Amino acid sequence: MEDKIKAIEARVQEFVIDTRDKLEHFRLQFISKKGEVSLLFDELKALSAEQKKLVGKALNELKKFSEEKFKLSQEQLESNTAATTFTGDLTLPVIPGKTGGQHPLSLTRYRIIEIFERLGFNVEDGPEIEDDWHNFTALNFPENHPAREMQDTFFIEKNPDVLLRTHTSNVQIRLMKNRKPPFRAIMPGRVYRNEAISARAHCFFHQVEGLYVDTNVGFADLKQTLYHFAKEMFGKETKIRLRPSFFPFTEPSAEIDISCLICHGKGCNVCKYSGWVEIAGSGMVHPNVLRNCGIDPEVFTGFAFGMGIERITMLRYSINDLRLFSENDLRFLKQFKPVM
Ligand code: DAH
């Protein structure tokens, strides 16, 4: 019996525990109910009282020693799991972590903000759930005027009307109503329209509104600002063209086109063989809009513009389907710059 104890003790001592598997192996082999140490206690019962005294002490010591070794190894494994399980080559270059990336619409939004901030524009924000007055009436859309039909609206409540804003122009009103001119701001955000989803339309999308109101702001300022923007955004060679248009909140109004980036004016299916691509609506702020916000149009004038972030992103990266932006397909999203 004493020899057995010594032999087991030697094996307990030699047993190397450097993984969780080996720890469990050790437990089963020696200290579990059917382990070798426990079985020796059964054998002890058969001995005479005198022998029990003699061997019992040694056996108890073996039990204590085995249990302590188990406990110590367990603590060690828990505290440095990483260090003890790493068996690779430490000199290899690190594998880049999966940090995620920025959405292409965010990349474009940041770029637009960057360009206008350098011209002294602040970034302003406004609500997506809006009342009729800020989204339409104050912007000089007469009630029941067909111009309201240009933007098919999601109404949340009727009388008084609460709706999902159809454009970011509501922020112009909130800004002019709440603060004193001059204003030089851009207002990015999400907008909603009740449109069937296709490659070219979606029920929600993003715009950036721009507003510059001061004494002596003229049409030339509008033109030069947007020309500067187009060159910064799409490259020095880019040209712009202004086409007469109509918006209730600007007079005169113009659609801003840029020369087609794909065919450089020769004609292709992106520009529908015209050589030009529309990027924004714009115009001089209508005197009624200024008046609705308590600003004297005899003293202050201004220009405004609104552009679609999706449209600009599609041109920038040659993306041909609007749905890609909201499908969350990693094969698409992974192609854009990761966050650093
Ligand atoms: N709000 C217009 C739209 O969503 C875009 C727009 C046009 C904004 C002309 C403006 C502007 O500020 O001056 O279609």
Image (tube, rainbow, N blue to C red):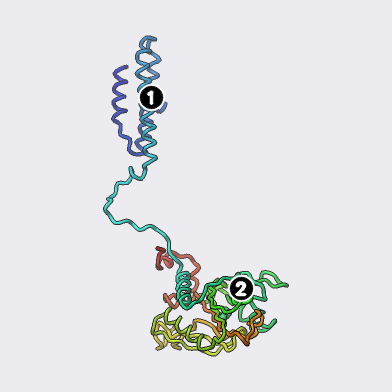
Secondary structure beneath label 2: loop
Image quarter hosting the N terminus: top left
> Which quadrant: the C terminus?
bottom left
Q: Residue furthest right?
A: 159
Q: Which residue sits at x=31%, y=24%?
A: 9
Give the x, y percent position of residue 228.
45, 83
| Badge 1 amino acid | Lys
Q: Residue drawn at (29%, 49%), measured in percent from left and top?
A: 88
Q: To which residue does mark 1 refer?
A: 64
In which quarter of the view is residue 96 placed?
bottom left
Instruction: Pinpoint residue 40: horizontal percent, then vertical percent.
Output: 37, 20
User: Picture coordinates of residue 214 (x, y %)?
Assistant: 56, 82
- Numbered tag placed on residue 49 in the rendering: none
Quadrant of the picture in which ligand 1 is shown: bottom right
Residue at 63 percent across and 87 percent down: it is 298
Cα–Cα span, label 1 and label 2: 75 Å
